[in-house]
């Protein structure tokens, strides 16, 4: 007799959620609904736009639930009628009320991109890079009323490469999330895995990032600035001011060259016509930049059309 398929509601909204939704569907789990965020204005025209998970769910002909709020009684009744065995959340973007977490017959689990209890909160990938962590990973946890504090069913870890920015690391972790989740679903449902409590005394927190966080202070050490540039790509992008315009730094590299005479933020070109900037201790080699009103471009190309002599970033 064929076993009854596990009935899953998966909650997600961002690109990070997509590999897990796709893998669950490809492995023929019964996704009874995809819980996601409603359409939001985006782009220059602020046109109502569907998020990546909603687009994928519709393409796969899955039931989509995109409530504006999860507090309504109709929300609870709608989800309860689906009679899910599991609720899986991954980058959903909102808190889920406890009464909804209590609906599934087996578990409500969350896929979090850090090695918990490190980096609970909204920006775990960026925080790991900003902190200079050499490794990170995925934690599969039971959802509780306290943010990212539930006991852990399974983890997987990976090194963070020095050249890796948040976008590249996020893409890798998203793929790892899909594999970790599907490798453990059966054991979680059948109670073959019991979760272990986190070491709460070791918890660190990853706050929500704002555009103000991305402002570069050139008097800080070069390694610190480089971490910010890596952590804030693809959003909000580290930036400074250049001739009273926003100047975004998409990517950079460390430089062994030292300049003790120019003030921090000074633009200097070397014999290779590379774009070097002085900082509080060393120099940074900018590789991809974008001046307000222009397209993103290699720093070498930017310098060809810009009189950089004597220019100081941050002014």
Image (spheres, helix red, strand yellow):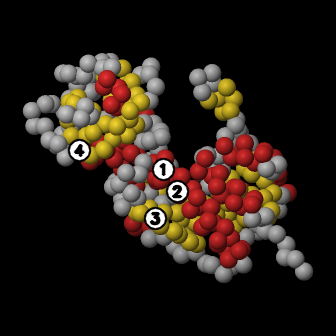
Q: Nearer the viewer, mark 3 or mark 4?
A: 4
- Element type where label 1 sits in the image: helix
Residue at (87, 77) in percent of width and height: 2
Q: Quadrant of the C terminus?
A: top left
Count residues near mark 3 (Cα–Cα under 10 Å), then give few for <14, some for 14-19, many for 20+. some
Q: Position of residue 312 (x, y in %)?
A: 23, 25
- How far apart marks 3 and 1 lie (CA) works out to 13 Å
Q: Is residue 310 left or right of residue 289?
A: left
Q: Position of residue 76 (x, y in %)?
A: 78, 52
Q: Secondary structure at mark 4?
A: strand
Q: Earlier in the sequence, mark 3 or mark 2?
A: 3
Q: Which residue is mark 4?
A: 255
Percent coordinates x, y for residue 133 in the rendering: 36, 59
Residue 70 in the image: state x and y as whole percent: 71, 46
Q: CA distance from mark 4 to mark 2?
A: 27 Å
Q: Earlier in the sequence, mark 3 or mark 1?
A: 3
Q: Circle 1 is placed at which residue position?
A: 168
- In the picture, measured across the screen, residue 65 lies left or right of residue 247, that is right
């Amino acid at each position: 007799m064929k076993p009854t398929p596990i009935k899953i509601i998966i909650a997600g909204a961002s690109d990070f959620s997509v590999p897990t939704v796709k893998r669950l569907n490809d492995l023929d789990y019964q996704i009874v609904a995809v819980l996601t965020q409603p359409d939001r204005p985006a782009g220059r025209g602020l046109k109502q736009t569907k998020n990546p998970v909603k687009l994928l769910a519709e393409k796969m002909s899955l039931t989509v639930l995109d409530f504006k709020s999860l507090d309504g009684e109709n929300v609870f009744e709608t989800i309860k009628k689906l009679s899910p065995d599991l609720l899986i959340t991954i980058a959903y973007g909102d808190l889920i009320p406890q009464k909804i977490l209590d609906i599934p017959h087996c578990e409500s689990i969350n896929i979090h991109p850090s090695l918990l209890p490190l980096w609970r909160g909204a920006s775990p990938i960026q925080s790991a890079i900003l902190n200079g962590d050499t490794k990170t990973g995925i934690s599969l946890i039971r959802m509780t009323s306290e943010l990212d504090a539930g006991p852990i069913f399974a983890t997987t870890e990976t090194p963070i490469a020095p050249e890796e920015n948040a976008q590249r690391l996020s893409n890798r972790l998203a793929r790892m999330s899909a594999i970790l989740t599907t490798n453990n679903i059966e054991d979680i449902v059948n109670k073959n895995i019991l979760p272990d409590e986190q070491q709460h005394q070791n918890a660190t927190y990853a706050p929500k990032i704002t555009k103000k966080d991305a402002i570069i202070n050139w008097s800080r050490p070069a390694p610190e600035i480089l971490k910010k540039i890596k952590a804030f790509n693809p959003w909000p992008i580290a930036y400074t001011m250049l001739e009273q315009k926003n100047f975004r730094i998409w990517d950079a590299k460390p430089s062994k060259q030292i300049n003790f005479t120019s003030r921090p933020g000074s633009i200097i070109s070397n014999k290779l016509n590379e774009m070097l900037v002085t900082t509080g201790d060393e120099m940074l080699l900018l590789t991809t930049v974008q001046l307000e009103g222009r397209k993103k471009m290699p720093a070498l190309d930017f310098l060809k059309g810009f009189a950089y002599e004597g220019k100081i970033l941050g002014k």
